[in-house]
Image (cartoon, grey):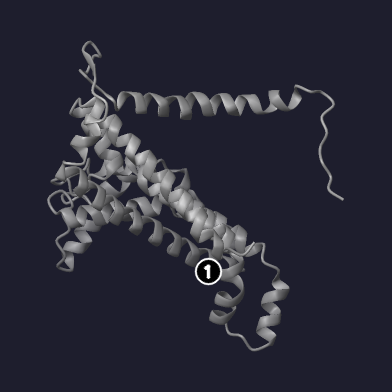
Amino acid sequence: MEKRVIFNERWLPIWLVAPQMIVTLVFFFWPSVQAVWQSLLVEDAFGGNTKFVWFENFAQLFHDDNYFASARLTVVFSSLVACLGLALSLLLAVMADRVIRGASVYKTFLVWPYAVAPAVAGVLWGFLFNPSIGIVSYLLGNIGINFNYVSNGNQALLLVVMAAVWNQLSYNFLFFLAGLQSIPKSLIEAAAIDGAGPARRFWDIMFPLLSPTGFFLLVVNVIYAFIGTFGVVSALTQGGPGKATEILVYKVYNDGFRGQDLGGSAAQSVILMAVLILLTVVQFRFIERRVHY
């Protein structure tokens, strides 16, 4: 028999949901509507001269080689951040789940990076790899590796990927660790009695049971890689050198606030929003089929 909560007061459920609905409407839906409307306009920086141009801003984007270069870079960057972040956090979670002595200290150190804002993470990694005063750059130089992300685009992209992965690692680690600890130990012990080794137990028992957690984190990490890494890029490289790290979310800011192309920037944000919605739908439509609940 299904149990359902019954409210005696008719308006109580509405009042309980209303604060979250107001926040969602004001900070999510309203800005989205404003962005769609602004993408159809051409206006100056102060809004004194506005012209309705329909889809000209979108047409210009689709003929802009720099925009497609940024889109290709975003695909590579997001794939690296999502895949590396999930793989490393899963590895750390498996290792932490097996630790007995000092487990609380080990887990605490792994959780701490989540308290660091993306912009602060970018500054920290910038200090570590600074070509003049960075301790890591100095150590790499001693073994013959010249690491200078200020002038080398590939090294700058690598550094941004590492900073973004590190900043999201704790979030993924917490969910994977919680998922591992929720798996009944009797299943693992039974597999061990049957002669299954650690690798076989992980792939045949633990990994399938972690699929709901992994699917959720995949969606979250893709969204994070596309838009949540703005602070890391802005603080660390500002899209440079030579647009080597100018991903789409930073290009929206750069063209809108620096280039004063408000209509084109709004069009970029609309396309980025549509791409994220499409990716999320595709993940729920196709990848969720392989998830075992």
What residue sits 21% from the left and 30% below the top?
A: 56
What residue sits 67% from the left and 62% below the top?
A: 182
Quadrant of the drawing holding the C terminus: bottom right
Percent from the top left, x then y, of residue 187? 70, 75
Q: How many marks?
A: 1
What residue sits 47% from the left and 55% below the top?
A: 283
**As rendered, which of 19 and 233 lies closer to the eye?**
19
Percent from the top left, x then y, of residue 4? 82, 41
Please determine whether, in this image, residue 122 is positioned above or below residue 10: below
Say whether residue 135 is visible.
no
Please determine whether, in this image, residue 11 is positioned above or below residue 71: above
**As rendered, which of 35 and 170 lies closer to the eye?**
35
Please determine whether, in this image, residue 249 is positioned above or below residue 185: above
The answer to whether residue 124 is left or right of residue 59 is right
- Looking at the rendered structure, the secondary structure element under dot 1 is helix
- The image quadrant that residue 206 belongs to is bottom right
Percent from the top left, x then y, of residue 243? 17, 45
Structural crowding at the residue carrying mark 1, measured as other residues with C-alpha within 10 Å and reported as few (<14), some (14–19) or many (≥20)? few
**As rendered, which of 115 and 219 lies closer to the eye?**
219
Say whether residue 287 is visible.
yes
The answer to whether residue 66 is left or right of residue 221 is left
What residue sits 24% from the left and 52% below the top?
A: 73
Percent from the top left, x then y, of residue 261? 20, 27
Mark 1 residue type: Met
- The image quadrant that residue 33 belongs to is top left
**As rendered, which of 195 and 252 lies closer to the eye?**
252
* Outermost residue to the front: 54
Residue topped by disc 1: 95
* Outermost residue to the right: 1
